[in-house]
Amino acid sequence: MRTILSPRHAAHAGNVELDAGAILPAYEMPSRAEIIKARVAEVGLGPITEPDEHELATARKVHDPAYLAFLPTVWPEWEKAGRGGTAMPYVFPTRGLRGDVPPQAIEAKLGFYAFDGGATFVKGTWEAIKSSHDTALTAAGLVRSGEPAAFALCRPPGHHAGSNFMGGYCFINNAAVAAQSFIDAGARRVSVLDIDYHHGNGTQQIFYARADVQVVNLHGDPMTEYPYFLGHADERGEGEGHGFNHNFPMPAGTDWSGWSAALDRACDLVAGHAPDVLIVSLGVDTFERDPISNFRLSSADYPRMGRRIAQLGLPTLFVMEGGYAVDEIGINAVGVLTGFEE
Ligand code: SP5
Ligand code: ZN
C-alpha cells in the first residue's frame, strides 16, 4: 500500500508538555514519523509520497469553523503578546465558568478551545497540522479511487480533537475529516475503528449523534487512563446515532489474549454496520514498553491485529495516531500494515 507523509510535520518540534508536575520534552515528537517512514521503506511496504494541498471545507463539516480559524492565529498572537517557548493552555471554562464567550487574550483563547494542556504550539505547528490534514485527505482519495488500502502517516495525530477543542497532542481530527470526505463522495456508511491505547474522545464526540459513521474504540479504562472523562462502555451514541458508538475499555496490564478478544467483538460490530470503507485510527501505544501507557502487547502482536482487520475484507484507510516507544514505533506500526497485506 502507499504511504502519504509530509515533510512539513517536522515543523512541529521542540515543544514541551506537563507530565506529573514536571516540564518535559513532548512525547509526541518528529522522530516518531521519521522512524515509521524508515521502516516503511525497509520492508518495502510501497511508495511513500507527499500529500496534495486540500481546502478546509471538509474539515469545517466536522469542526466548528471558528475553532479552525483560531488554529493558525495561535503562534502569531502568542508572539505578538511577547511570548516565546511553547504556547500552552492553562485555564479552562469548566463547570461554573462562561464557556460561551470566547475571550480576546491568546493565553485564554487557548484554554477556551482545549480540554487539556497537551495540544501545544511552536512556530511551525499550524503548518504541521495542515499537512497532517492534507495527508489524511490525500490517502483517503487513494482509497476512494480504488486502492484496497492506504496509510496516512499523520503527525500531529487527531483522535482527541473534537468539533471545537484540541487536546492530547491533537488539533484537527484527521480520521474524522477523512470519514466525512468518504460520506461527501457518496459512501452511505463508514466505520472508524480506533485501536490507540487512549480513548478517541474527539472522534466519538464528533459522530456521537450520527448513524452514518460508526465509531468503535478499544482503549485503557478511563477510570484510570487518559483522557479520563470519556470512553466508558455505556456511551452508545445519542439520537439517530444511538447504537453507533461502541467502547471497549480494558484494564491496565491487558495483553494480547484480552485485547484480541475485544478486537474480535469490535470487528463483528464493524461487519454488522456493513460500511463502504473502514478507517483505522492506528495508535501503537498499546505496546508493552510504551512510556505513557499500560497495556502489554508485544511487537509480534501487531501483524496479528493487521491480519484480523484484513479479514473484514473492507477498503481500509489507516490513519496514524499515537505510540511513544519511539525505538519500536516503526516495527509496530508497520507490523500492522504488513500483517494486513499478508
Ligand atoms: C494521540 C495520543 O496518543 N495522545 C495521548 C495523550 C496523552 N496525554 C497524557 C500524557 C500523560 C503522561 N504521563 C504518564 C506518566 C509516565 N511518565
Ligand atoms: Zn494514544
Image (cartoon, helix red, strand yellow):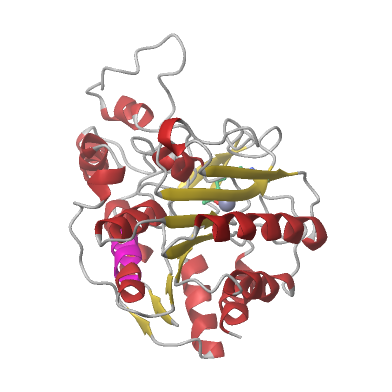
In this orientation, which residue lies closer to the viewer: 306 or 291? 306
Q: Please provide percent x and percent y for residue 122.
A: 34, 49
The image shows residue 322, relative to residue 250, as above or below, that is below
Q: Position of residue 245 (x, y in %)?
A: 53, 42
Q: Main secondary structure of the magenta part?
A: helix
The image quadrant that residue 146 belongs to is bottom left
> In the displayed structure, would residue 193 be above or below residue 337?
above
User: Which residue is at 47% across, 69% downward?
Assistant: 33
Please report the residue visible at 56 percent of the width from the left and 36 percent of the height from the top. 236
Residue 6, can we see it? no
State the image coordinates of residue 219 (x, y, percent, origin top left): 65, 48
Could you say where residue 207 lies in the image, as x and y percent from the top left? 41, 42
Q: From which residue to which does the magenta span run?
A: 131-139
Q: Is residue 342 above or below residue 120?
A: below
Examine the structure image and report whether residue 132 is included in the region drawn in magenta: yes
78 lies left or right of 288: left
